[in-house]
Image: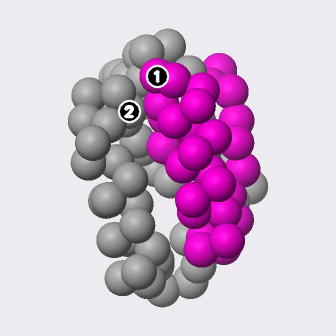
Amino acid sequence: HFKDDRTKWRQDIDSRFPHCVDLAPPEGGFSDEVEDTIVRFLTPLYGTYDLYADLQGDEPCIRYCFAQEQDAAAFQAALAGMALKSRPKMAG
């Protein structure tokens, strides 16, 4: 049941917030600077995004999902040079 619940939960997030950016943290996690940048970016967007750890692909990542495409694009642009890997992705 847990796996089915987790799949439904992700599908719900992906349907409500279809514009995603995957960030793969470096070994040891994100630096304080990157974490601060993420928090500063996300704080004014409260309620228009969600996130979860995606461990199913080739590389574990944190998936940041946004309701608006422009927010996902701006997030990706702001973090692309700071995270190990950053890739935009449509949910689903």
Residue shown at 50% from the left, 53% from the top: 62
Residue tagged by mark 2? 49
Few, some or many residues within 10 Å of mark 1 (<14, 14–19, 20+): many
Q: Depth check: give the residue in front, 2 or 22.
A: 22
- Residue drawn at (35%, 27%), measured in percent from left and top? 48
Residue 36 relative to residue 86: left or right: left
Q: Which quadrant would the N terminus be assigned to in this image?
A: top left
Q: Residue 23 or 74: which is nearer the viewer?
A: 74
Does the magenta segment cover residue 69? yes
Q: Is 63 left, or right, of 43 in this rendering?
A: right
**Which residues lie in the magenta part?**
63-92
Q: Position of residue 89 (x, y in %)?
A: 70, 35
Residue 68 part of the magenta segment:
yes
| Residue 60 in the image, given as x and y percentages of width and height | 60, 59
Residue 11 in sight in this render: no
Disc 2 residue type? Tyr
Q: Earlier in the sequence, mark 1 or mark 2?
A: 2
The residue labelled by disc 1 is 67
Q: Which mark is residue 39?
A: none
How far is the residue under mark 1 from the one under mark 2? 6 Å
| CB under 8 Å between discs 1 and 2 | yes
Residue at image point 49% right, 13% down:
15
Q: Nearer the viewer, residue 55 or 33?
A: 33
Q: Nearer the viewer, residue 28 or 66?
A: 66
Horizontal and vertical percent position of residue 86 = 68, 58
